[in-house]
Amino acid sequence: MSNRRALGRGLNSLIPENKELKPVFNYNKKNDENINKAYDSKVESISKISLDKIKAREGQPRKTFDDDSLKELAESIKEYGLLNPIVVTKKDDHYEILAGERRYRASKLAGLDKIDAIIKVFEQKDVDVLSLIENIQREDLKALEEAQAYQKLSRDHKMTQEQIAKTVGKSRSYIANTLRLLNLYDIEKRALNDGKISPSQARTLLSIADPNERSLSLNDFINGSTNIRKVERKISTKTEKKEST
């Protein structure tokens, strides 16, 4: 529960809460003073933007979208309209999505020509952090997508695990354990992405030194013939035998 509150504070520092958005959906220049009072100085405007002027961000952490879920959202948008605007930033001759790609895709499916959008100006680091937090808070990323996003923050913006943890409202150990998943073998990554093994099972595999034993454990996890406790007990027994010889 505390993690979600922390995420909310992090996200609201970049995106205003939905309840504050409702009075100014129909943006025009006369509303500038009211908008500046309602939002921080990084907000440029709130407007309706043609969907053909909007593009998804290449560095977006989420790589996959559930088709059935998008169709359901599209039907909701057809009936009730888009309740929450997406967040974009101007880039060259188009707008790039910072938050709300799922709503953008569903709006296209719903046949909309334009979409409500908050236009903001951010530094690249803010863009990466915002996109990551938005995805974690609204709809969980796949474990490896989340790990890759943390890796990007570390690599591109020199953020420590402690800094990343405070930013996204997670513990440092959670960040470290998530990043460890990037060390999996390709076959293990595929199993994790496909939901055949859990992140906890994947981390257990990382503690197995012998490749053959690790492969057998992967298969056992997939077919349900073992569990984490049994594998850890097996690893511990082998370690004790080696130490006693």
Image (cartoon, rainbow, N blue to C red):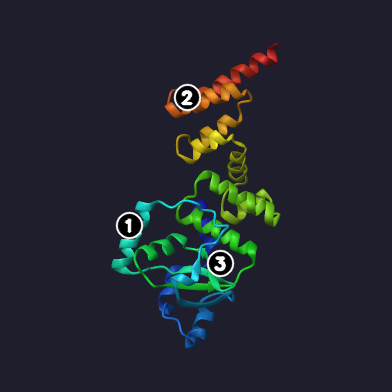
Secondary structure category for the residue under label 3: loop
Neighbours of disc 1 within 10 Å: few (<14), some (14-19), many (20+): few
| Labels 3 and 2 touching (C-beta < 8 A) | no
| Labels 1 and 2 touching (C-beta < 8 A) | no
Labels 3 and 2: the sequence-earlier one: 3
Q: Which mark is residue 14?
A: 3
Which residue corresponds to the image point at 60% horizontal and 31% vertical from the top-left?
A: 206
User: Label 1, on which residue?
Assistant: 72
Q: Position of residue 188 (x, y in %)?
A: 54, 34
Amino acid on which the number 2 mark rests in the picture? Asp
Distance from label 1 to label 2 (Cα)?
36 Å
Q: Is residue 127 left or right of residue 107?
A: right
Asked which quadrant contains residue 205, the reply is: top right
Q: Position of residue 148 (x, y in %)?
A: 59, 48
**Is residue 232 visible to us here?**
yes
Secondary structure category for the residue under label 2: helix
Neighbours of disc 3 within 10 Å: few (<14), some (14-19), many (20+): some
| Residue furthest bottom in the image | 30
Secondary structure category for the residue under label 1: helix
Which residue corresponds to the image point at 54% horizontal and 48% vertical from the top-left?
A: 145
User: Label 2, on which residue?
Assistant: 220
Q: Is residue 154 left or right of residue 137?
A: right
Amino acid on which the number 1 mark rests in the picture? Glu
Neighbours of disc 2 within 10 Å: few (<14), some (14-19), many (20+): some
Front residue of 54 and 24? 54
Q: Position of residue 236 (x, y in %)?
A: 60, 21
| Residue furthest top in the image | 245
Distance from label 3 to label 1 (Cα)?
28 Å
Front residue of 30 and 61? 61
